[in-house]
Image (spheres, grey):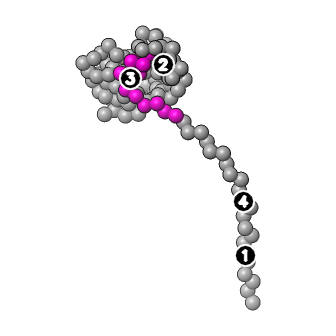
Amino acid sequence: MACAVTPSPSPPTAPTPEEPETQITELTAEQLYLAYEASQANADVQFKGEIIKVTGVVESMDKDAAGTAYIILTSNETNKTQMVKCLFSKGYGGEMMGVTSGDTVIIQGIGFGYAEYPIITDCKLLEKK
């Protein structure tokens, strides 16, 4: 006669605390520029150290004196005064291959502050439209 083996019930698992959702602020290059133009102090409170996803038109691309690749975004091809500087992390500059002036892109990085225009660091190119 065969014996049926009943598996013992698993002990209840303790609920795990939910991981906090990472907040990502999505805005256009124009919106970020205008926020800093209105109040640099308020914009720093809102964006500095935060993850930002910015959509804009590529004005130019280059490397700074330290060899860090960057893209300057504008709000559109006709208004080139509202700019945002996006500094790429080491190793991510290659993402810029195939991107040219006039392309619309989405870039994600960390808000850094303002020096001539808003700056985003540790950038990654998410999308080229």
- On the question of residue 61 being in view, the answer is no
Q: CA distance from mark 3 to mark 4?
A: 49 Å
The residue that mark 3 highlights is 31
The residue that mark 1 highlights is 6
Determine which of the numbered discs, if any, sits on residue 48 in the image. none
Q: CA distance from mark 1 to mark 2?
A: 62 Å
What span is colored magenta in the figure? 23-36
Does residue 3 appear left or right of residue 53 in this picture?
right
Which residue is at the far left?
Answer: 78
Residue type at mark 3: give it. Answer: Gln
Q: Is residue 27 above or below residue 11?
A: above
Q: CA distance from mark 4 to mark 1?
A: 18 Å
- Residue in the image at 52% along x and 26% along y: 50
The quadrant in which the C terminus is found is: top left
Q: Quadrant of residue 103?
A: top left
Give coordinates of residue 41: x percent, y percent. 51, 14
Query: Of label 1 and label 2, which has the lower sequence position?
Result: 1
Residue type at mark 4: give it. Answer: Pro
The residue that mark 4 highlights is 12
Query: Of label 3 and label 4, which has the lower sequence position?
Result: 4
The residue that mark 2 highlights is 43
Give coordinates of residue 45: x percent, y percent. 53, 20
Query: Of label 4 and label 1, which has the lower sequence position?
Result: 1
Q: CA distance from mark 3 to mark 1?
A: 63 Å
Query: Of label 2 and label 4, which has the lower sequence position?
Result: 4
Query: Of label 3 and label 1, which has the lower sequence position?
Result: 1
For label 4, the SS is: loop
- Residue in the image at 37% along x and 34% along y: 127
